[in-house]
Image: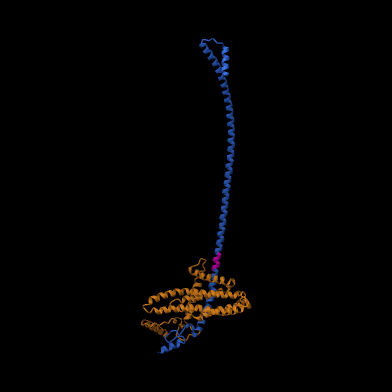
Chain colours: A blue, B orange
Amino acid sequence: MATETTGHEAAGACVDAGGSAIGMPQLCADWIPNQVFWLIITLVVIYFVLSRIALPRIASVLAERQGAITNDISAAEELKRQAEEAETAYQKALADARAEAQAIGEKTRTEIKAQLDEATQEADARIAAKAAESEKAIAEIRDSAAQNVEIVAKETAEAILAALGHQADKSAIDSAVDNRLKG
Amino acid sequence: MATEMEAAQGADAAAHGGEAGGLVFHPMDQFIVKPLFGHGEVGLFTITNVTLWMLIAILGIVAMMVLGTSRRAVIPSRAQSVAELVYGFIYKMVEDVTGKEGLRYFPYIITLFLFIVFANFLGLIPMSFTVTSHFAVTVVLALAVFVGVTALGFIKNGKSFLSLFWVSSAPLALRPILAVIEVISYFVRPVSHSIRLAGNLMAGHAVIKVFAGFAALAVVSPLSIVAITAMYGLEVMVALIQAYVFTILTCVYLKDALHPHH
């Protein structure tokens, strides 16, 4: 029972003999100074730990990371610019090569055309010469053939008349044949 | 020790009483402040359970914010990203609510936030003591904000800080009435600021204890265990939300001190 008395005394105004709270412990004035005292100590400790150590450290880490990200982005932009430059140069080289190829092609084509024209002209001239020559020969042949036809016709006519028993005058026959040939 | 033994006997008695049909609840016993060593009076410097759980909160904050960031890695570890997340969260809150000039007070505000968050979550450990469930604690926190912000308002703005109470956008006839209302609401701020936090935590913890008392009855014990689980989930949310609310209200009050003109 002695212990109970001590317990009762220790409990004070806010705790009953059974160790249970009397009313709301939140309203027990006996405990307020103690709570306030330790709260102030705690807040001061937390404030100094945070403001002296933790917050500057985190701020510097965040700033460093931001710096690293900014650097990386600018490096990436630089690389992108270089790649774009390389692409432009490549495109330019490609266009140049294409233009040169076209120029060479054009030049070759013109040369070939000139040669071809020349050869064509030459061939045309030759063909014309040959044609004129041939025409001449043909005309000659035609003329001689016409004379031959006349001669043959006259001779044939004479022969036919002879065969029929007529002695015809040679000049009459000739004129008759000539007349017929003309007619 | 005797008190503890008696407390145990009391609990036993309560349990037996429960089986007998007469349930005995002590939902407020968890809020009792008691000395850690011996069982004397709780004096100003006595090392009590308050001291213990505040110390654990300090250790938790040091572990998270100091040890977690000790490697200062550009690519953060998990612990470091948690610390950075909290830093960024509060930093952005202060910047968004109070503007650039409020960032000078960022260390004070993150101190409040971390203390409340850690105290709230440590209070959720079974058999622990929730320091933020006591008005003594939250009133000091709220008064520190109130006094600090009011002093800051007068230092920064001089007499023009009083224009906070003089609603220049209202009709002239209404302004004196509005001024009275504004002054009253200004002085109610620390009351609501502190009671909101302690009240929420006290109520939640007490309700869990009441459900736990019902668990002594075999018939309702499954239901009471489900209810405890649900309440615990709610309390986890409340622990974070109340810390957030306290912090953002601090930012809002700070904004009023820095820019008192409506």
Q: Position of residue A152 (x, y in %)?
A: 54, 16
Q: Is residue A113 left or right of residue B215?
A: right
Within the image, what quadrant is residue A138 found in? top right
**Residue A49 at least partly seen:** no
- In the rendered image of this protein, does residue B86 appear above or below residue B188? above
For the N terminus of chain B, the quadrant is: bottom left
Q: Position of residue B242 (x, y in %)?
A: 50, 75
Within the image, what quadrant is residue B175 found in? bottom right
**Residue A4 at least partly seen:** yes
Q: Nearer the viewer, residue A165 or B132?
A: A165
Q: Is residue B209 left or right of residue A178?
A: left
For the C terminus of chain B, the quadrant is: bottom right
Q: Residue at x 54, y 63 (%)?
A: A69
- In the rendered image of this protein, does residue B252 appear above or below residue A160? below
**The magenta segment:** A61-67
- In the rendered image of this protein, does residue A27 appear above or below residue A75? below
